[in-house]
Amino acid sequence: MFALARNALRAPARRAFANAPAAAAASLHTLPDLPYAYNALEPYISEEIMKLHHSKHHQTYVNGLNAAEESYAKATSVKEVIALQAAIKFNGGGHINHSLFWKNLAPNAEGGGQIPEGAFKNALERDFGSVENFKKELNTQTAAVQGSGWGWLGYSPKSKKLEIVTTANQDPLITHIPIIGIDIWEHAFYLQYKNVKPDYLNAIWNVINFKEAAKRFEDAAK
């Protein structure tokens, strides 16, 4: 009976991390390499921020997730399994969100900020009126997040449309398929933009990887 209960509780966690990097059992999750240099997003996101954000903050989520899953595997009671859910959600969400976020960005000199013609751009214009309206709406809703969290452009499997969603803390986006995610935690911008969130949100569009977003949209809409 206990084995069935524990497996039932583990199932959501397994589904949530199905796309996370996997390695040996001793270290299931690893920090992904950035697809560009730490200084490649300047002047819009500083080298100092990128180093800290990637090598310190994301690494902390990876470490926390591995530790939580190790404890999860050794749990001997339902109570222990339940007690670990918060750590798995927080660190697992942080790992998933940041792994997406790095690919979400691209150096301006290499096409960051440029939206290719095609189905994705057409969908933005259909669902938001224009690309500029889309940016304004996502910036407005992301800036309004209380405390730490994320602003998302997601594809809704129900409505078959692109929609803006926000999540708190490191909660992953599960109601929609993520297309673009913007980290609004202070560690993502404070060293450069201080407490002026709108400046960070306006600047980040210069390094958004719209080619990656277009690919995600096309895959989601199939």
Image (cartoon, rainbow, N blue to C red):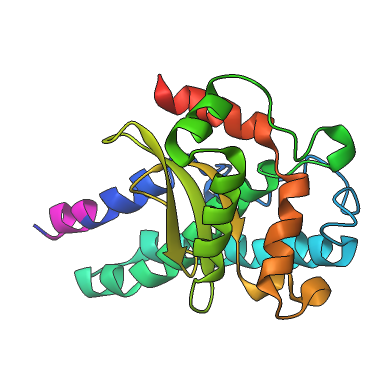
In terms of depth relative to the viewer, which is nearer, 172 or 135? 135
First to last magenta residue range = 2-8
Rendered residue at 81%/76% (across/down): 191
Specify the principal SS of the magenta part: helix
Q: In which image quadrant can residue 76 be found? A: bottom left
Please provide percent x and percent y for residue 176: 37, 43
Q: Is residue 137 above or below residue 145?
A: above
Rendered residue at 81%/66% (across/down): 49
Rendered residue at 61%/54% (across/down): 98
In terms of depth relative to the viewer, which is nearer, 101 or 90? 101
Does 145 lie within the magenta span? no
Q: In which image quadrant can residue 35 be found? A: top right
* 13 sits to left or right of 102: left
Q: In which image quadrant can residue 95 be found? A: bottom right
Please provide percent x and percent y for residue 43: 90, 57
Rendered residue at 83%/62% (across/down): 51
> Can you see residue 188?
no
In terms of depth relative to the viewer, which is nearer, 173 or 128? 128
Does 3 lie within the magenta span? yes
